[in-house]
Image: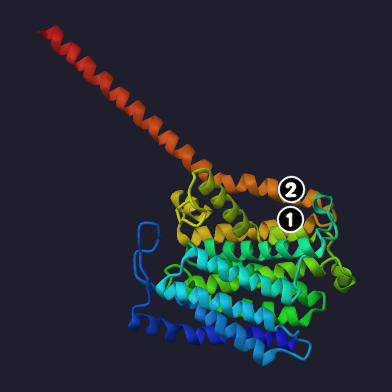
Amino acid sequence: MVNLVMIFATSLLIVLFAIPSIITVAKLKGLYDKPNDRKLHTNKIPRLGGLAIFASFTVSICLWGTTDFPHMQYLTAGLIMLFFSGLKDDIIMLSPVNKLVMQICAAALVCIAENIRITSFHGLFGINEIPFYLSVPLSMFTLIVITNAFNLIDGVDGLAGGLSFIVSTTFAFWFHLINQPAWALMAFSLSGAILGFLFFNFNPAKIFMGDAGSLTIGFIISVFTIKFIDLSSTPLAGDFKVETAPALAIAILIVPLYDTLRVVLVRLSKKRSPFKADRNHIHHWLLKLGLTHREVCYTLYFINLLFVSMAFLLKDNSTIVVFSTIVAIAAVVGQLPAYIYRHKITELEADFDESNLLKFEMEEKSVENEYKKN
């Protein structure tokens, strides 16, 4: 337990001390995220926060990793690949295709060389054990989707950081409860780094995490997710055994996963590239409703926590029941901001038309009265 507290505190303090220096260097070198028509900020803001997150995470692991820590050279290699691809994109831009290639390589290292895979669906869709030749592509797809989900949700000050802190802390406590010290250390280290970053990222943000941060965080969390699914129904979980792990994992990641799925489907339906950025994310719709950056963050934090709580309350039901309930509620809740906004626009247009009609009728009567006088 002492190691968990120390690794969290170390990671937190490294970020708190590192970010002011990173902001200074970014300003001196002109390494800003410049505003444009699709971004919400209006000032030039440094986007190298991922550098502090990655450094604090790795240094803390090296300092407080115990002898129980697994040999994870391939996971580390994949993480370094994603970090530097994100860092390059933050500085000189990297094409979506090149980023995807790096993600595929990192995912392959983790799934094949490190053997971190989804081996069972725990009865979801009637599927239990998954053969190796299907497990590898499924696990790689999961890693890439979750990694990009956190990259895409990073659109409002404090949103990606806050959601990833909730997710990472949830996994951290669960790994601790099932006596997986190595994974608990990793999760608490990430939580500490993210919390330190949030001190500088809440609106008005002094720094962004950039792709180096969002890809690093997303990749680590995607690995946690697969380990959660893999370990949750084994005897190692003891009293905390969970048979509905896939559905629970979706609930824990509900906001970034749902937002990514929705945005990609909308872009494809409009015959646009799924990689082309727009203002159709759930946080954009909440901003259109008049919420501030902080209010958007608090709203989505609350929704994510609500889904996690709901999933744990339903965990004694079958996997398909929990999955169906979560997906159905997410579909309804996720569409509410856009529905409310469009309903308000319709009302405004109706009021405008009615006002114009009344004005036209008054003018018509005025002309008629003038004609009668003459």
Quarter of the image for residue 42 reads: bottom left
| In the image, residue 162 above or below residue 296 | below
Residue wearing tag 2:
325
Comes first in the chain, label 1 or label 2: 1
| In the image, residue 130 above or below residue 337 | below
Q: Is residue 131 left or right of residue 186?
A: right
Residue located 78% across and 63% down the image: 133
Question: Is residue 318 in sight in this rendering?
Answer: yes
Quarter of the image for residue 245 reads: bottom right
Q: Position of residue 113 (x, y in %)?
A: 73, 77
Residue wearing tag 1:
310
- Badge 2: few (under 14), some or many (20 or more) residues near its Cα, within 10 Å? some
Question: Is residue 153 in sight in this rendering?
Answer: no
Residue located 69% across and 49% down the image: 327
Residue 2 vs residue 135, the one in the foreground: 135
Location of the C terminus (image quadrant): top left
Q: Position of residue 174 (x, y in %)?
A: 76, 72
Q: Position of residue 222 (x, y in %)?
A: 66, 68
Q: Position of residue 272 (x, y in %)?
A: 48, 49
Q: Is residue 340 left or right of residue 348?
A: right
Residue located 69% across and 90% down the image: 64
| In the image, residue 9 above or below residue 295 | below
Q: How is the image coloured?
A: rainbow
* Amino acid type, callout 2: Thr
Q: Is label 2 in a helix, a strand or a loop?
A: helix
Pair 1/2: label in front: 2
